[in-house]
DNA sequence: TGCATCGATGCGCGCCGTGCATCTTTTATA
DNA sequence: TATAAAAGATGCACGGCGCGCATCGATGCA
């Protein structure tokens, strides 16, 4: 949320961010080159020209360092969702936010995609991806609650009986759409595996639309017709 | 899927399963008593009276050993879903399967709940839980595809253009309902935290219904009414 | 009964993650 | 500017982790 852009940042803070970025990028680069399993923390620290001990001041494992590349894009998605006008429904707003983030050809965005590709290639990182998503869920749930003007923590504590459905909605909706996005992204990454540069976002956009449409339609289906 | 019940099982296989179960139960018991962080693999092996080295022949970490208690319940849920008649819609069938599994007062089921409680208490295990869910997704997606009579791998490979929506559905639906179940279970475990024995499944049943109903309704909502 | 197979075990090694003490850089203050 | 305080970076050491390897013993089979 308030992650960026205090105008006054000392040299100390800048160096910390630089160190963190160097470690994050080194972890991603080496893991893409040699595979996550074949990279040691010491190699990552050397590549970034940082002491081994210092690595652990920033990340508790190499997996966490790689996953850090995901985190940025995740927060960006939440921010874009919050920027959508309230005239849009929740699912409409989410769709637009996804497309905006996808079409950013940022450096951070590129690393985000690369990290996702890496995760597809190495099952060790799947839990990390899902952990990032879990954190995203909480943030998006709050954003959704605000979007529909449903205060997250109602001051009146007496109506605890039947508001359970309403209290559930933001969590459920956030979890569902992020899960849908994950499924679509996985399919898209699978289809575009191998090709490096172009990254056809139009196809991804169509698939996001398909998934959100199905969610909005209720995604129930009848069983096989008898006989 | 085919995990159980060849009638002829030699002593060797039985001992293997016993060893695995002993390690799994020891890991869960010690973790519940002392917290996951404060338990070493050596303690688990000692508790189960198994050599330390042998532990790693079965699990690659204590987290994996604890998560094994989840896996059983997960597979049971898929099996119950497959057993539902095709006259039920996908979401109806899933709801019934969940309730059946929840009301089993099995020993395995009890361990399943205890493992979930343990996960809530120790963030180290969240990735493991999500990893189990990821595996569940794949299995449930296949079950859903069969339930709606949608062959997972159609022999005709020519219609690759517009069947993307249909191919997406099982994955999307499986991911969505399992995510919903996870959200509801987390809320329920939070509410019932502290009380050991009763485990009010009726409340859980209501919340599962609420979540599935919202999914079936499309879970879209309008933004805050302007001005 | 003898042999082949396979799991359990002990040993050793390299990596992981962290507490602690120290050094260096940055920031605040006189 | 000079100097002290604060905070991050680094080196060191230690215990746990995860696994390859060789060996032993139990099991299954002829």
Image (spheres, coloured by chain):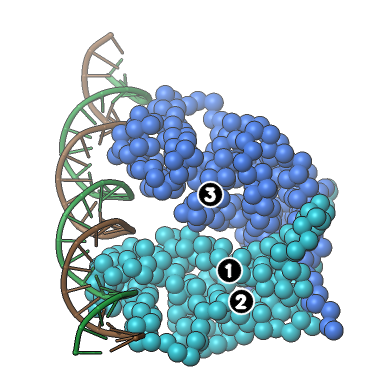
Chain colours: A blue, B cyan, C green, D brown
Q: Is residue D2 above or below residue B180?
A: above
Front in this rendered view, residue B91 or A12: B91
Q: Position of residue B161 (x, y in %)?
A: 81, 51
Mark whose residue sits in front, 1 or 3: 3
Q: Which residue is depicted at the point 24% across and 72% down?
A: B51
Q: Is residue A78 above or below residue A137?
A: above
Cα gap from disc 1 to disc 3, whole angstroms:
19 Å
Cα gap from disc 2 to disc 3, whole angstroms:
26 Å
A114 left or right of A56?
right
Subunit of mark 1? B
Q: Position of residue A8 (x, y in %)?
A: 50, 25
Do discs 1 and 2 share a chain? yes
Location of mark 1 (residue): B136
Residue A113 visible, this orientation: yes
Element type where label 2 sits in the image: helix
Badge 1 or badge 2: first in the primary sequence = 2
Mark whose residue sits in front, 2 or 3: 3
Quadrant into which the C terminus of chain A falls: bottom right
Location of mark 2 (residue): B78
Location of mark 3 (residue): A121
Do callouts 1 and 3 mark residues in contact (Cβ within 8 Å)? Answer: no
User: Can you tell which quarter of the image residue A137 is in?
Assistant: bottom right
Q: Which residue is depicted at the point 64% across and 70% down?
A: B140
Q: Which residue is depicted at the point 53% across and 49% down?
A: A121
Do callouts 1 and 2 mark residues in contact (Cβ within 8 Å)? Answer: yes
A101 left or right of D3?
right
Element type where label 1 sits in the image: helix
Front in this rendered view, residue A168 or B92: B92
User: Can you tell which quarter of the image residue A219 is in?
Assistant: bottom right
């Amino acid at each position: 949320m308030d992650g960026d852009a205090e105008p006054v940042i000392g040299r100390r803070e800048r160096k910390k961010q630089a160190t963190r970025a160097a470690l994050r990028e080194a972890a991603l680069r080496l893991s893409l080159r040699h595979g996550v399993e074949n990279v040691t923390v010491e190699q990552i620290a050397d590549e970034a020209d940082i002491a081994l001990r210092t690595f652990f001041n920033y990340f508790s494992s190499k997996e966490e360092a790689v996953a850090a590349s995901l985190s940025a894009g995740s927060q960006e998605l939440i921010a874009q969702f919050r920027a959508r006008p309230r005239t849009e429904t929740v699912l409409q707003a989410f769709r637009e936010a996804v497309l905006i983030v996808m079409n950013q050809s940022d450096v951070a965005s590129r690393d985000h995609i690369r990290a996702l590709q890496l995760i597809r290639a190495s099952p060790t990182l799947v839990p990390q991806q899902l952990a990032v998503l879990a954190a995203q869920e909480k943030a998006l749930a709050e954003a959704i609650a605000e979007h529909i003007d449903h205060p997250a923590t109602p001051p009146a504590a007496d109506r605890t009986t039947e508001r359970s459905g309403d209290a559930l909605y933001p969590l459920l909706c956030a979890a569902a759409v992020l899960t849908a996005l994950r499924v679509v992204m996985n399919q898209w990454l699978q289809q575009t595996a191998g090709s490096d540069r172009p990254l056809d976002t139009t196809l991804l956009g169509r698939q996001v639309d398909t998934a959100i449409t199905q969610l909005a339609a209720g995604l129930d289906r009848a069983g096989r017709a008898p006989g």
